[in-house]
Each structure stands twice: as structure tokens, then as C-alpha cells.
């Protein structure tokens, strides 16, 4: 088993950026000696290779970064492992070493990692390797097979989207600002899904772009590489996921219109009322009036009881523990919210994997995943059947989707 830490020439560029390349590769046998493989660095001109790592078991700070170099077969993401155990990522830069200082001070200088002396990179990597060895000692304290499944599938899912990038318009720097210019690679920007959040729901930001919170103005900067964007959004996604938990059957049609009939209001007002109730607290009056919320309140009460009795609850698909020891000031509604958001993400991971398997043989690409929607760069040569098949995959759990199309991400109809 090896600890492997890739060092790219430019620490500020996305690993998939065409102007970024591997500079050094730190390799250390677990409990053994380390060595630094060189590929692009001023201190050493010889080029090493990493063929001996192809079938090895690898521990690394971030598997997505390592996979941008090569699709190694057995990689354990230590940041995810630490989060799986303690619900927090590792602070790899806690020592404020000279490499971090140089990168922050000279962030406009290209390929700065290729001029920082190799021995300084070795010092930093040795510190990171010590962190990794300490964290890995907790392997027997967790449901390791469940972690391993999540590790493999979550990374596969989100890495597969990141690799495609999203094409941008010529006026992207006017729409955002000039900071985005250095991150454009072959007329694309690359996203970066951060999986180790408190709720388990990924954030998605890189450079100066927050892909998870794009407003209508900034969405106009993204255009299809092929013929058009097609976006599929789940209808009332959270409510339908909750209905699965409590075994509640909504009638055909809009969930918000259905609940609005209980409140005596229209669609738009119903949506606002529902989420206020759902995340603000379900009163006795609402529970007695609306059968759905009566069952939801019973479910929340049960999860809160389990959380306090057994000191954790588990997510439904990957069995990740939301544990008492990893949170402060928890209450019944927080436990419920964390469980639902984690479940949404886990369902999405399975969906993304199924979509990518199908899309392997067509030109159409999945280029962005939001919480309840998926954006595709559609090639009309694939034919309309591709759109029906995508819809079928997304609706496999009986969660209906709505479809939009457009020539840029802002003007979808």
C-alpha cells in the first residue's frame, strides 16, 4: 500500500486545465521510505514513471485530483475517509508552510510549483503523509465496506462530470470578471464538486465561479459545445424523497398543487408554505389537518429518538453514520434535514453513474449536476431517443422530471 500525493505545476488551476501538468509525484510505502518522482521541475530534468502504481492500493488526500492524472484502480480518498468518520475534512494546510505562502503571494505567477525547491515539496508531503498514516489507523473503527462503496461511486460520479468541463461564451469575462480568464481551458471552465460538507450535499465551486449558485445573469456565460442544453429538473424532489421514507403515495400531478388544496392556496403560495412548514417545524394544527405532514412529523420524531438512543442514524443507501459525537446543538429538525440532504445526494450518485454508463456510446454529455437537476450538452445527431432514455433513467425511482432546453444556460424554456 502506498501514499501518493500529486503536485501539479500550477496549484491554482484545475487539474484538468490544458496548461496544468503533473510536476512531481510523492510516493511513500505505508510505514516505509518515501521518494519523489519528477516529471516537470527545474531541479531535475529526468522523467520518471508510475507504472508500478497501476494495480497498487493507494491512499491519497483527494482521489479526484489523482484520477485527473491516471485512472488508478484502487484509490482510497483520505479526506472522504476522515469526513466519513468525523464529519469534517482534513485541514491539509494547517502548518502554513512556505509552499502555501509562495502560492498565495505569487498566485499570478504561472507554474510556481516547478520552481519551488523539491526538498520543500518533500517536507510538506512528509507532513501530509504523517496525517494520512494517523487517520488510516482508524480503519477498523468504521463500517469500512460501506465507506469503500461510497468512496468508489461518489468519486466516479462527480469526477466523470468534472472531466467534461462546460463551454463558455466569448464574453464570459464580462459576465463574471477578469479573474475567470486564467481558468478557461480550450473555451471551457471546469467545476469542482466538494463532497465533504456538513450535510453530505456537495458544494461546487472553482476559481471565482460558484457553479452551485449561478444566477440568471451568470448562467448566460455557459453555452453548449454541441447543439443545445437540455436540463432535467425533478418535480418537488425533497417532498417525493420524504414520501419514499414515510411510504406516502402522492396522487398524479403536481405535489405543490396537491398540498395547496389542503392549505386552500395556489401553486406558488403552496410551495412557500410547504417549505416553511417542513424546515421550520410542523405544528399540531398542520399535522392534524394534512395527512402527509402527520406522517412526516412521526418520522422526524422516530429519527430523533434513534439518534439519541443509539447515538447515530444511518443514511439509507451507503449507510454513512450521522453520529452524535460529530455535531453540536442538534435538534430533531436538523437531524431530519441532514438525513434528507444526504439521501438526495446518495440517490443522485446512483443516478449519475447510470446516466454516464448510458452516455458512453453517444456524443451527448452530462456537464453539470445541481441538487435537483441535471444539465446535458445535447448533440442532435444522437437523436431524440437519447432524451427519452435519459428521462427513463432519471425517473427510475418514480420521481418525475421536467425538461427545459436552450442555447445558453440562462435562456432555458
Image: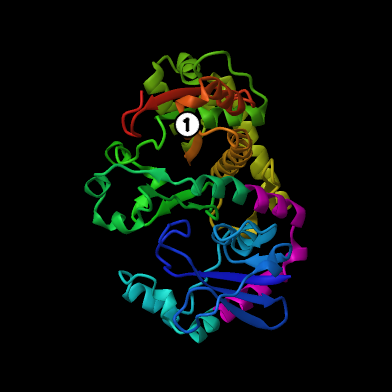
Taking the view exactly as shown, the residue that stands out farthest to the left is 174
Q: Does the magenta stretch include residue 13?
A: no
Answer with the quarter of the image where residue 135 lies: bottom right
Q: Where 91 falls versus 319 (above or below)?
A: below
Q: How is the image coloured?
A: rainbow
The answer, for residue 269, to whether it is visible in the render is: yes
Q: In this view, does 254 lie to the left or right of 351?
A: left
Q: Is mark 1 on a helix, strand or loop?
A: helix
Residues 378 and 29: in front is: 378
Residue at 67% x, 25% y is 247
Residue at 38% x, 78% y is 101
Answer with the quarter of the image where residue 298 lies: top right
Q: Where residue 141 sits in the image (x, y, percent)?
A: 75, 63
Span of residues in magenta: 125-153
Within 10 Å of disc 1 (Cα), the crowding (few <14, some 14-19, many 20+) is few
Residues 225 and 60: in front is: 225
Answer with the quarter of the image where residue 249 lies: top right
Specify the quadrant that holds the N terminus. bottom right
Specify the quadrant that holds the C terminus. top left
Q: Where 196 falls versus 108 (above or below)?
A: above
Residues 95 and 274: in front is: 95
The answer, for residue 371, to whether it is visible in the render is: no
Q: In this view, does 90 lie to the left or right of 307?
A: left
Q: Where 257 falls versus 295 (above or below)?
A: above
Q: Where residue 93 sits in the image (x, y, percent)?
A: 48, 73
Residue at 66% x, 41% y is 303
Determine which residue is flagged by label 1: 277
Q: Does the magenta stretch include residue 132?
A: yes
Amino acid at each position: 500500500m502506498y501514499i501518493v500525493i500529486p503536485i501539479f505545476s500550477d496549484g491554482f488551476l484545475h487539474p484538468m486545465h490544458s496548461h496544468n501538468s503533473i510536476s512531481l509525484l510523492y510516493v511513500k510505502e505505508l510505514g516505509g521510505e518515501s521518494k519523489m518522482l519528477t516529471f516537470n521541475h527545474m531541479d531535475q530534468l529526468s522523467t520518471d514513471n508510475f507504472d508500478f502504481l497501476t494495480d497498487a492500493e493507494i491512499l491519497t488526500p483527494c482521489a479526484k485530483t489523482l484520477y485527473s492524472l491516471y485512472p488508478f484502480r484502487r484509490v482510497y480518498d483520505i479526506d472522504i475517509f476522515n469526513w466519513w468518520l468525523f464529519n469534517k475534512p482534513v485541514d491539509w494546510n494547517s502548518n502554513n508552510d512556505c509552499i502555501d505562502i509562495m502560492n498565495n503571494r505569487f498566485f499570478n505567477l504561472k507554474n510556481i510549483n516547478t520552481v519551488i525547491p523539491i526538498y520543500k515539496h518533500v517536507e510538506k508531503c512528509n507532513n501530509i503523509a504523517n496525517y494520512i498514516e494517523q487517520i488510516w489507523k482508524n480503519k477498523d473503527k468504521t463500517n469500512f465496506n460501506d465507506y469503500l462503496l461510497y468512496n468508489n461511486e461518489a468519486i466516479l460520479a462527480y469526477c466523470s462530470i468534472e472531466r467534461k468541463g462546460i463551454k463558455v461564451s466569448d464574453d464570459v469575462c464580462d459576465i463574471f470578471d477578469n479573474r475567470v480568464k486564467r481558468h478557461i481551458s480550450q473555451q471551457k471552465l471546469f467545476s469542482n464538486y466538494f463532497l465533504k460538507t456538513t450535510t453530505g450535499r456537495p458544494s461546487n465551486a472553482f476559481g471565482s465561479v460558484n457553479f452551485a449558485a449561478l444566477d440568471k445573469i451568470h448562467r448566460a456565460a455557459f453555452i453548449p459545445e454541441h447543439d443545445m442544453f437540455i436540463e432535467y429538473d425533478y418535480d418537488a424532489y425533497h417532498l417525493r424523497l420524504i414520501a419514499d421514507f414515510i411510504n406516502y403515495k402522492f396522487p398524479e400531478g403536481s405535489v405543490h398543487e396537491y398540498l395547496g388544496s389542503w392549505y386552500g392556496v395556489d401553486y406558488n403560495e403552496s410551495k412557500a408554505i410547504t417549505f416553511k412548514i417542513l424546515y421550520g417545524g410542523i405544528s399540531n394544527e398542520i399535522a392534524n389537518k394534512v395527512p402527509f405532514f402527520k406522517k412526516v412529523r412521526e418520522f422526524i420524531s422516530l429519527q430523533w429518538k434513534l439518534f439519541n438512543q443509539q447515538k447515530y442514524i444511518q443514511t439509507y443507501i451507503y449507510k454513512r453514520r450521522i453520529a452524535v459525537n460529530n455535531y453540536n446543538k442538534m435538534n430533531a429538525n436538523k437531524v431530519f434535514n441532514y438525513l434528507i440532504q444526504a439521501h438526495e445526494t446518495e440517490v443522485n450518485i446512483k443516478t449519475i453513474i447510470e446516466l454516464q454508463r448510458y452516455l458512453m456510446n453517444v456524443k451527448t454529455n452530462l456537464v453539470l449536476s445541481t441538487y435537483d437537476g441535471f444539465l446535458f450538452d445535447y448533440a442532435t445527431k444522437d437523436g431524440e431517443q437519447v432524451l427519452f432514455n435519459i428521462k427513463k433513467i432519471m425517473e427510475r425511482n418514480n420521481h418525475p422530471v421536467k425538461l427545459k432546453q436552450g442555447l445558453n444556460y440562462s435562456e432555458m424554456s
